[in-house]
Image (tube, rainbow, N blue to C red):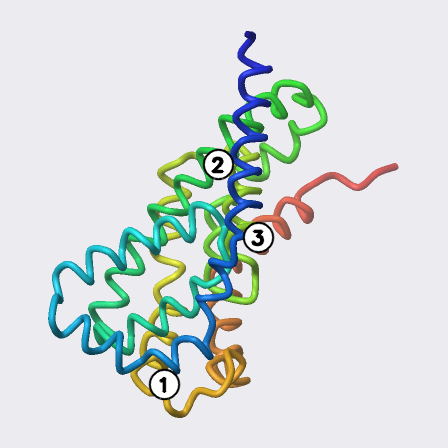
Amino acid sequence: MTKQNRNIVLLLLFIGAIVLLRLSGVGDVLTLESLQQRREELTAAVRERYALSLSLYILAYIAVVALSIPGATVMTLAGGLVFGTLVTVLAVNAAATAGAVLAFLSARYLLGESLQERYREQLARFNTEIESNGPHYLLTLRLIPVFPFFLVNFLSGLTRVPLATFVWTTSLGIIPGSAVYAFAGGQLETVHSIGDVLSTRVLLAFGSLALFTLAPAIISKFRRGSSSPPSS
């Protein structure tokens, strides 16, 4: 079996696993309603076996992110409820980054390398732009929690963004969002929907951070445009 055929088979198996997990109803458990119904049960379980609960929480979070299962937001709320804001932010940062890296590497080695090789000329300009401003773009996408987390992981794997860049932008960029959700988890009785967490003020704050992060890339493009000779 050639490398290309092997990657296709692995990609199909990976997609199949995601589909099966989604159809299995796992995502239905990771809902705000379910969390509110089981809050006392979860709190008691964590109080009884704190270290084990935290370890299982981190492993489950990694799996949810790596396999693109809906529910990471609810898990962050749950963490804030039972572990507190600070511990949850640290645990989520480690787990979400690890899960994102697994998804990133899966996309890169199962599809990204062959895509880059096949469309090398067409992607040359895009790759140059990513090489220059990739960190700014990635950090901006991470800072704004409305962008689907799993989609950023997958699409980043199709580019030539270095793994190290992907890791640090993910780890740094998810801190504000995870802090907001973890804090909201500690105030779960006031949360009636996920939308209650992301108020207009919070979204504006995230947008301001993202704009500040993206500013160097915008200034760089403006300078390149200004310095290019006018067409005759």
Q: Position of residue 118 (x, y in %)?
A: 67, 19
Q: State the SS at label 3.
A: helix
In the shown orientation, is residue 51 left or right of residue 194? left
Q: How many marks?
A: 3
Q: Position of residue 44 (x, y in %)?
A: 19, 77
Placement of 198 over or under 225, stated as above or below: below
Of residues 181 and 42, the one drawn nearer to the viewer in this rendering: 42
Q: Earlier in the sequence, mark 2 or mark 3?
A: 3
Q: Residue furthest top?
A: 1
- Give the residue type at disc 3: Leu
Mark 1 Cα-neighbour bin, 10 Å: few <14, some 14–19, many ≥20: many
Q: State the SS at label 2.
A: loop
Where residue 23 is drawn, which disc sits there? 3
Where residue 161 is drawn, which disc sits there? 2
- Give the residue type at disc 1: Leu
Residue at position x 44%, y 34% in the image: 105
> Which quadrant of the figure contains the C terminus?
top right
Q: Earlier in the sequence, mark 1 or mark 3?
A: 3
Q: State the SS at label 1.
A: helix
Q: Nearer the viewer, mark 2 or mark 3?
A: 3
Tell me the distance, in whole angstroms, between the alpha carbons under discs 1 and 2: 38 Å
Placement of 54 over or under 99, stated as above or below: below
Q: Position of residue 206 (x, y in %)?
A: 48, 72
Where residue 188 is drawn, which disc sits there? 1
Tell me the distance, in whole angstroms, between the alpha carbons under discs 1 and 3: 28 Å
- Give the residue type at disc 2: Val
Image quadrant of residue 88?
bottom left
Of residues 135 and 109, the one drawn nearer to the viewer in this rendering: 109
Of residues 10 and 120, the one drawn nearer to the viewer in this rendering: 10
